[in-house]
Every structure is written in structure tokens, then in C-alpha cells.
Amino acid sequence: MSDTLAPLTEALLDAAKRAGAEAADAIAIDGTSLEIAVRGGTLEQAERSEGVDIGLRVLIGRRQACVSASDTRPETLREMAERAVTMARLAPEDPTVGLADPAELAAERDARHLDMSDPSPDPDPAALEEAARRAEAAALAVKGISQVQSASAGFSRRRVHLAATNGFAGGYERSDHGLGCVAITGEGLGMERDYCGDGRNHAADLMSPEDIGRISAERTIARAGARKPPTGAYPVIYDERISSGLIGHLLAATNGSAIVRGASWARALLGEQVLPKGLSLIEDPHRPRASASKPFDAEGLPTARRVIVEDGVLTGWTLDLATGRKLGLPSTANASRGTSAPPSPSNGNVALTQGDIDLAGLMAEMGTGLLITSMIGSSINPTTGDYSRGASGFWVEKGQIAYPVNECTVAGNLRDMLRSLRPANDARTHLSRVVPSLLVEGLTLAGA
């Protein structure tokens, strides 16, 4: 990887210094992706993209500017650097911008131990098309499926290299294999659909096309005849497929950018109970074969395991260097960036404490209420935590699924919802967000 991207980032830094930058960092991303979709047993869509994107951030005093391009010719690098320096001189001062101190930089800059890159040959279009066809055929073989909306297979390989004038230089490679199927049952207004998909770093870990197709079909058949649930206050279970969204709202509320802006319902909750006792939320950027693993962050700082919530208590914010400086705190090494903007804080691999019962046990504990398997739309106030979303899934009575439901809305307040969580034990541990099905008390349902 360094044979091509490392010299490119060094050339960007050299151009920035010649143009008058006092400090700079550069990022180069080399990516290849291939996506194949079939319908009715024939090829419907084939997309391939590849190329190199580069980004440069320059600093003059406490002013900064970012530029990006997808052209790597020497004259383009020179023009980028000159433009960035001109922009930085006109930018407003920000006392919190700046590169990391050299003493803080990550010593580990090789990601091979994270096993994120599949060493096997990249799949060719014919192999992806065949996998998509097999998934579609498996779905159509299930009685009651009227059609398959889409069956697709994809692959991408991405290489990233970061360098800065503070002496940092490092990069890593990641591959991603994906397979998905969306099946349909019924016709007209009675039509229902559901899906199954899987994504892995290594092709050997991917679910089989037959399982993908069959599961998507079985989920779809289970939704046939859906109707609205009753209106009222009921407990709700967020199925494992969508439960990570709830934890995502907590991560967004504890992100340093939201805290700095004062636009977070969690801004006064540091050191306070945000989840039930016994539940912890842990970030681990060094989990092998996980899609958000990385040895260092976008500012060259060493990543490490971090407890975000411990025994239900919020322990800290998610920070990069700039937001940390604004709050008088050190970075948590959570900087993330693309080619066209400066770093900003972002979470990677997180895992919520799992419970001791499965989904069936959680439904038995709930008794009567709603099991949500998919959501649509969103009305969430990030400052107050007021929450309202469209949902569909299954109505549960006496701990058993009674009938499928759709066209309903669930509403509550995130602060209260999160403090009432009861987890199952069904989280998929290969995902970047390992979150089981979650029982939430006291939500308001608007249905029939």
C-alpha cells in the first residue's frame, strides 16, 4: 500500500510547505468497488468504481483550510496546496485547531493484526452475479413469495494512508463483501416486503446466498396480512436488526461536537445514570474482522478500548483534538475524516452488555406489546431527546406473536427510554455495533 499512497501524501505535504503552510496533514484513499444486482434471473445492474481521492489540510497559526481532489498529477497537488494556503489565510481563527503533539502519536501503525483485509483474490463480476442469482432463487422457492424486489452482491477494497508534518505516517487496508435480498408477498395495498443481508471483511465468513434468500422470504411471509396495532402506552421490543439505532442516539448525544454546541439532551449527564445498572457500553477499535476497527485515528493518535458507559453511568464524551480542547479535555482518539473536511469525533466498534435471555424470553417478559423489526422516518429532537418514529413488526400477546403490524408510530423520550432497557442475548458479535434485542418500557403507540 505504501508504495503508492505514502509518496502521494508526502508530495502533498511538501507542496503545502512550499506554498507557505506552517503545518499540514494529508490523506489518500484508494478504493475499488463492484456491485451486481439481478432480477428475474437476469442481470439488472452492474456498477464498478475505482480511483484515488486525496485531501489536504493546511494550518497557518490557528487558521485552517481543507481541499480535496481525485487528480494526482503534480500540478494538481501544487494547485491544491496554493489554494488551501490562500483559504487558510482568510479563515477565522480557532484557538483549538492544530495537529497532535509528536509525543502523543501512535507507535503501532500497522493494521495487519486486525485482519480487516481478505487475502483471497477479489471476486469477479460473474461470481457476484451467480451469488445474487442463488439468493433470488432461494427466496422465490418459498411458498407465498410473489417476487424478489432485488438480490445483490458486492465487494469493495479500500486503502487509506495518512501523513502529517508532525512526523506521523501510517495506513491500512480493508475489504468488504456483501450480499442482500428483498422479497415481496401479496399484491397492491396488501403487499409486504422484508429483507436479509450480510456484510463481512472476509468472504469466507459471509452467509450463503441460499440462507440470505430463504431468510428474507421467511421474514416477508411472516408479515403477510399486517394491520395497525392498538393505540396506547405499551412496552416495546426493538429487534436485534434495528436495536443498534437506539444506542446510536446515545452515541450521538455524547459526541463532543454536540456537547460543544450545547445541542444534546445528554449535556448534563456526565457521571449520571443513562442506562440501567449492570449495563455497560464499550468501544473496542482493535476487534479483529470488524468493519470499524483501526489502529490509529484520523489525527494519528493511538486507539484503545474505552468504556463509554460503565454499570449504567456515563463516563465521558467522544472527542477528537479540537472538541477536546474546546472542553478542556484530552482527545479520546476518535477523530474521523474524509478528504474534504477536517477531523471530527466519531465512534467505531461498540458493544452493549448482553442479557441472559433470548428474544422469546424477552417477549414472555413483556407479555403484551410491540416487537419492532423495521423503522421508517424520524422525528428526534437532539436537544430534548423527544423521540417519534414510524414502525412495523409484530403485535405480541401473552408473550407470543399474535399478528404482524404496520403503519404505527412509537413515541417517548430517549433519556427515559434508555434508562429502562432490558437486553436479550442475541447480538451478532461480528457487527461494528454489537447490540442485542432491547425491551423498552412505557412508549406511546399510535396505531388503529
Image (cartoon, rainbow, N blue to C red):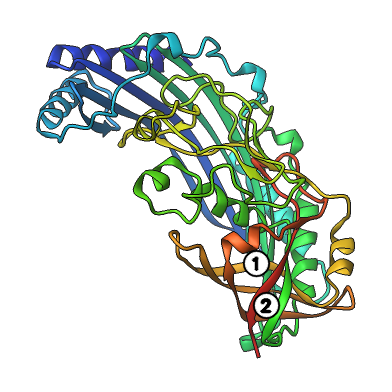
| Residue at 22% from the left image edge and 23% from the top image edge | 59
The dot on residue 192 is 2
- Left or right, 360 with respect to 106, comes to right
Quadrant where the C terminus sits is bottom right
Q: Is residue 314 positioned above or below 236 on the image? A: above
- Position of residue 117 measured from the top left corner of the image (x, y, whole percent): 62, 26
Provide the secondary structure element on which disc 2 rests. strand
Give the residue at x 56% y 51%: 250
**Position of residue 347 measured from the top left corner of the image (x, y, whole percent):** 53, 39
Q: Circles 2 and 1: CB distance less than 8 Å?
A: no
Up the image or down, 324 lies above or below 443; here it is above
| Mark seen at residue 374 | 1
| Badge 1 element | strand
Q: Nearer the viewer, mark 2 or mark 1?
A: 1
- In this image, 195 relative to 389: left or right? right
Q: How many marks?
A: 2
Question: What residue is rendered at 41% in x and 23% in y?
Answer: 299
Determine the CA span between mark 2 and mark 1.
12 Å
